[in-house]
Amino acid sequence: MLSSLRANGQRLGVCTSKLPSNAIKILECFKLIHYFEFVSGPATPQPKSQQLQELLATGSISEDALMIGDRAVDLQAAHSNSLKSAGVLWGYGDREELKVEGPTHLFASPEELTERLQR
């Protein structure tokens, strides 16, 4: 999925609640780091909505970015910053949790997400 999106010219980044150094180690361990232009995480506890606000302010992401997440907090952060959101059902959240947040998209599989983003 990630290689297809990058090959299609999609810009990818990570916005996580983890410390950036920990997130980078995880991405390196799974040999995924090269797919991402940035890894954003707070040095001290910070709402994900504030992280997105800072990414918008610095130009790391644009107003047409799509926030993809597996938990309600991801979708809430997108909405509080007027970004489109996509809930994914292969992570920690379930359909009910994500659907309540009214995501722009709801994807059941990585293939479904990839197909939609390549249009």
Image (spheres, grey):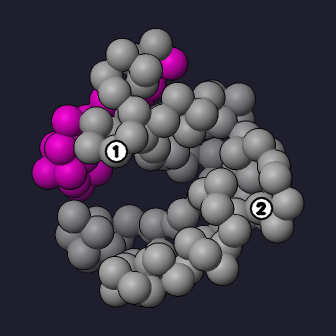
Q: Is residue 38 visible?
A: no
Q: Kindly report the distance in space between the C-alpha atoms of the residues bearing marks 2 and 1.
A: 21 Å
The residue positioned 61% from the left and 75% from the top of the image is 22
* Residue found at the far right of this picture: 44
Q: Amino acid at mark 1?
A: Gly
The secondary structure type at the circle numbered 2 is loop
Q: On screen, 41 above or below 111?
A: below
Magenta residues span: 101-118
Question: Would residue 19 be found to the left or right of residue 32 on screen?
Answer: right
Q: Does residue 64 show up magenta in the picture?
A: no
Quarter of the figure with residue 48: top right
Between discs 2 and 1, the one toward the N terminus: 2
The residue positioned 56% from the left and 72% from the top of the image is 23
Question: Would residue 47 be found to the left or right of residue 104 on screen?
Answer: right
Q: Is residue 32 visible?
A: yes
Q: What residue does disc 1 label?
A: 91
Where does the image place residue 92, in percent across and percent down from the top left? 39, 40
Question: Would residue 118 be found to the left or right of residue 41 on screen?
Answer: left
